[in-house]
Amino acid sequence: MYEEYFGLNSKPFKITPDPRYLFMSDRHKEGLAHLLYGVTDSGGFIQLTGEVGTGKTTLVRALLEQLPSKVEIALIMHTQISSREFLLEICNELNIERDGDSILDIVNTLNIYLLKQHANGKKVILLVDEAQNLTPDVLEQLRLLTNLETEKDKLLQIILIGQPELRNVLAKNNLRQLSQRVTARYHLHSLSKPETFLYIEHRLRISGAQSEIFKKNAKREIYNYSSGIPRLINVICDRALLGGYGSGKKKIDKVLVKQAKREIQGEMILPKKNMAYPLVLKVHPTENKVVWKGEEHNNVEAGWQQMVPAQKKWLSIF
């Protein structure tokens, strides 16, 4: 919508990962170094944590691009499952044909597969996203998988990726044996203010910007709102560009960013059916979700359908 107006060839602040826009801050480079060290080590666990939207997925993508060809990856993204289901997911990711469906059968099948890959000079890495959601039973099963080894080498390298809660989970006394097997730990912090400025300029440059679009005071306001979290930076920058396009401004200033912030936070007063008392509709800043009448709905349409005609008419004037 606004790309042509600002002289861009694509939207610079989409929240979906795009390798063209890869921005490696000093923090990301340090985290990548930790991961590469852990992967080239003899085996065990690597732990990567960070707040939602700080770029953990970006870091993992960068890691995968630097891995040698003789590495096989199993990526597990669904973590609210049982131990047996978890093992089956690993087999599915590695295209392993199973001889049985019991946990013992699956582990034996995995062991045979890993030994064969090791004999062929290949390394197998298990990537587990949203690992903070794993149950203690699944984590214990993961620990047992690291017992699969030859006389010299571990057969499976495991990378646990999760939100900060993962550190608390692994610090529990009943998981101390697993925690002791973590060979590399890194917590990914958000971007600093200078890095936030560079991040914004980087994404605009990749999208074809030939001149400055965001004024310095706008970038400061973006940092204050986002605290340097890339996903939130993307959301507010995209909304600010839309606001600039709508108001006919070629430069994004602090005023437009503040307006975008209000829109993202999305707090609007709606009347009740009798129009006497207001209620609040809150629109989630990064997800298509609303809270109306104190209840959370998966999309804006769900909340809209529950409003009476008078409320819809009242809202439509904004």
Image (spheres, rainbow, N blue to C red):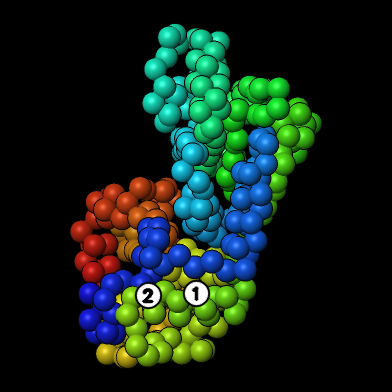
Residue sitting at x 54%, y 70%: 226
Between residue 94 and residue 279, name the one nearer to us. Answer: 94
Q: Secondary structure at mark 1?
A: helix
Can you identify the residue that label 2 sits on?
Answer: 206
Q: Is residue 296 above or below residue 285?
A: above
Can you identify the residue that label 1 sits on?
Answer: 199
Q: Is residue 2 above or below residue 212?
A: above
Between residue 280 and residue 117, name the one nearer to us. Answer: 117
Q: Secondary structure at mark 2?
A: helix
Which quadrant holds residue 21?
Answer: bottom left
Callout count? 2
The location of residue 107, given as percent across then percent down, is 55, 16
Question: Crowdedness of circle 1 by 10 Å Cα count: few (<14), some, many (20+)?
Answer: many
Question: Crowdedness of circle 2 by 10 Å Cα count: few (<14), some, many (20+)?
Answer: some
Three-letter amino acid code at the position of disc 2? Ile
Dot 2 and dot 1 residues touching (CB under 8 Å): no
Q: CA distance from mark 2 to mark 1?
A: 11 Å
Q: Quadrant of the N terminus?
A: bottom left
Q: Is residue 252 above or below residue 315?
A: below
Q: Is residue 62 visible?
A: yes
Which quadrant holds residue 111?
Answer: top right
The location of residue 144, given as percent across then percent down, is 65, 22
The location of residue 16, given as percent across then percent down, is 37, 58
Name the front one of labels 2 and 1.
2
Three-letter amino acid code at the position of disc 1? Tyr
